[in-house]
Amino acid sequence: MEVDGSRNVKAGDWAAGLHPVTRSRAAAARAYDRMSSWSWLEEPFERRPRAIGLGLLNVQAGERVLELGCGAGGALIRLARAVGPSGCVVGLDLSPSMIRHAEARLRHARLADRVELRVADASSIPVEDASFDALFMSFTLELFDTPEIPIVLAECRRVLRSGGRLVVVALSRATPVGWPTRIYERLHDRFPAALDCRPIQAGLALQAAGFDGVRSTVAPLWGLRAEAVVAVRPSTVRAPAPAKTDGGQAGM
């Protein structure tokens, strides 16, 4: 189901009702280092919404593409093939072990020469301004606590060229919020390390961050909903609407 995101967004709309992330970045990095050998277990869970998101991104040969939270490389293979030998993909992740697994996966696929991998934090992306044609983020934005989300999206806007595309795939808290989502949120609050993703309103967050042409595709996900959102960095960047959010630690 595709949703048009053209309506005006009031400050704070995107943050309404979001549950907090209490885990620190250091704890997140350690957790994903431990999980890296088992990352294949997440593949069936993430495959369908991630494929929808990659379709929305529509990467072309010769483009420069950035993936934030690339993990063990589940999307990097497809991105590297899409850009071709004349393009370039950069993958960033907070976990050194995940980066090592992604490197091995790319070497096996004989695509390592098209991909640069770095250990880095999405809230401070170590690349130049306006240096990418497209940016992909799958089940990563919701790992940040609510006050950090505008910071990450501002970084995304900074590194994209004018007219560059951003796709965010995330667990969805779009209204109406059903009982499966509310149960999951309670479990997230109780077991934040095991269920670290929590539902967010990604489409509204991108609008509030100053992106244009926001469109969402919602897909069912084991009783929950995932949202693949595509947006464009405008040629003249508007200042994002100030969001009123609760405090908390960042959780990627």
Image (cartoon, rainbow, N blue to C red):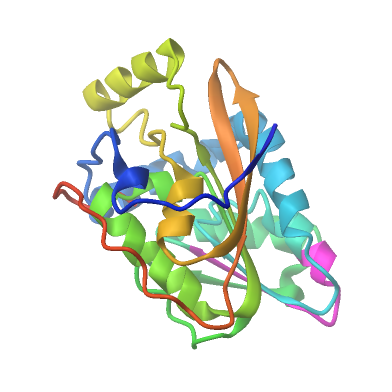
- Of residues 43 and 177, the one nearer the viewer is 177
Residue sitting at x 28%, y 33%: 17
Q: Looking at the rendering, which quadrant does residue 79 occupy?
A: bottom right
Is residue 242 one of those drawn in magenta?
no
Q: Is residue 189 left or right of residue 136?
A: left
Q: Looking at the rendering, which quadrant does residue 83 occupy?
A: bottom right
- Of residues 244 and 27, the one nearer the viewer is 244
**Measured from the top left, where is residue 61 in percent x and y?**
85, 74
**Measured from the top left, where is residue 249 in percent x and y?**
18, 51
**Measured from the top left, where is residue 50 in percent x and y?**
66, 43
Q: Quadrant of the N terminus?
A: top right
Q: Check the image and name the residue furthest to the front.
A: 8
Asked whether residue 140 appears in the rendered view, the answer is no
Asked whether residue 189 appears in the rendered view, the answer is yes
Residue sitting at x 52%, y 83%: 236
Which region is colored magenta? 80-92
